Amino acid sequence: MAKIVVKQYRSVIGRPEAQRKVVAALGLGRIGKTKELEDTPAVRGMVAKVSHLVEIVEK
């Protein structure tokens, strides 16, 4: 299956608890941290929920 690289570029400080949990579930937590994840509909949905905090990085 295809992989995507997700990078956190904004802080979760002051964000709702649900968004903090989504960022943590993606394996992120610090600005600048990247994570390579399977490209599934579930992961895409999580990224869409916090799209203002993370970005998909091209390999």
Image: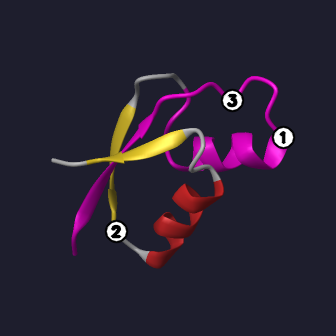
The image shows residue 41 at horizontal and vertical percentages of 47, 77
Give the Cα separation between the discs numbered 2 and 1: 25 Å
Instruction: Check disc 3 and give the amino acid type.
Output: Val
Q: Which residue: 22% across, 70% down?
A: 2
Give the Cα separation between the discs numbered 3 and 1: 8 Å
Q: Does the magenta stretch include residue 47?
A: no
Return the residue at label 2.
Answer: 39
The earlier-in-sequence mark between 2 and 1 is 1
Return the residue at label 1.
Answer: 16
Secondary structure under tag 1 reads loop
Is residue 32 placed above or below 34 in the rendered structure? above
Quadrant for residue 16, please give it.
top right
In the picture as drawn, the residue positioned furthest to the left comes out as 59
Left or right, 9 with reference to 1: right
The image shows residue 53 at horizontal and vertical percentages of 58, 38
Instruction: Check disc 2 and give the amino acid type.
Output: Asp
Secondary structure under tag 2 reads loop
Left or right, 5 with reference to 30: left
What residue range appears in magenta?
Answer: 1-29
